[in-house]
């Protein structure tokens, strides 16, 4: 009999899976289910987060954040780029537990084919024959102080001039440069 098994009745065994099922059944009151995910309170309609999390490592309400995100993959046609939506999720999640949104400074560094997700609507239509499904999300993020920077090397490679970017998106010399500058300004890099 292995270390993760217990006898259950005559000759039977109660395995790890049974113990896990029992444990999950008992802890169902503390786990969030699919219906517990909601958008807001900062970015409505985007960045759904669990409304019920039993924290053992709580976030102080006076916490300050300076976080840089990085994306390099383009979204599927008509889908939102999860990397872009993660910034809405970060804002919503922390505001929902009482952190003042003014204490949250976020930046997004965009490179690779993800650059197509931050084009203005006209440029997106000309290059991809469809409107940009990210327009309202990009606007909402920037309205809430999020900086979005494109890798200039990527833009040059794909023939994207500054005037083709969504209004407010900045052009950096490179993604590497943007990350170095943000780090010097006190931003941590979010690995997700």
Image: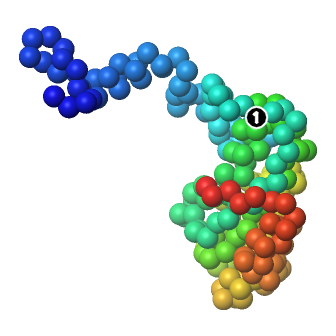
- Residue 16, horizontal then vertical, whole percent: 28, 29
Q: Is residue 61 left or right of residue 108?
A: right
Q: Residues within 10 Å of mark 1 (few under 14, many from 20)?
A: few
Q: Residue at x 84, y 60 (%)?
A: 186
Does 145 sit above or below residue 117?
Answer: above
Residue at x 18%, y 14% (from the top left corner)? 8
User: In this figure, what is the number of numbered marks?
Assistant: 1
In the rendered view, how is the structure colored?
rainbow
Determine the residue located farthest toward the top in the rendered image: 9
Tell me the residue at 72%/38% (across/down). 93
Say which quarter of the image contains residue 116: bottom right
Quarter-of-image position of residue 71: bottom right
Q: Is residue 170 left or right of residue 115?
A: right
Where in the figure is residue 107, as x and y percent of width and height? 79, 61
Tell me the residue that label 1 is attached to.
59
Looking at the image, can residue 176 be seen?
Answer: yes
Question: Which residue is rendered at x = 91% and y = 44% of the image?
Answer: 102
Q: Quadrant of the C terminus?
A: bottom right
Residue 47's spot in the image, x, y percent?
Answer: 67, 44
Instruction: Find residue 7 and report its image quarter.
Output: top left
Q: The N terminus appears in which quarter of the rendering?
A: top left
SS at circle 1: loop
């Amino acid at each position: 009999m292995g270390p993760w098994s217990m006898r259950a009745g005559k000759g039977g065994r109660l395995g790890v899976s049974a113990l896990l099922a029992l444990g999950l059944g008992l802890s169902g009151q503390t786990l969030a289910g699919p219906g517990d995910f909601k958008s807001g309170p900062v970015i409505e309609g985007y960045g759904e987060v669990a409304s019920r999390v039993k924290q053992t490592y709580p976030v102080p309400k006076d916490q300050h954040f300076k976080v840089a995100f990085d994306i390099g993959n383009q979204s599927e046609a008509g889908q939102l780029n999860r990397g872009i939506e993660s910034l809405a999720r970060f804002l919503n999640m922390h505001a929902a537990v009482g952190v003042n949104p003014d204490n949250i400074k976020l930046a997004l560094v965009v490179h690779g084919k993800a650059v197509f997700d931050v084009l203005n609507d006209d440029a997106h239509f000309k290059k991809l024959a469809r409107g940009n499904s990210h327009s309202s999300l990009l606007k909402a993020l920037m309205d809430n102080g999020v900086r979005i920077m494109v890798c200039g090397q990527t833009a040059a490679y794909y023939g994207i001039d500054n005037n083709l970017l969504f209004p407010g998106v900045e052009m950096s010399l490179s993604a590497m440069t943007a990350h170095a500058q943000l780090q010097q300004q006190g931003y941590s890099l979010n690995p997700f």
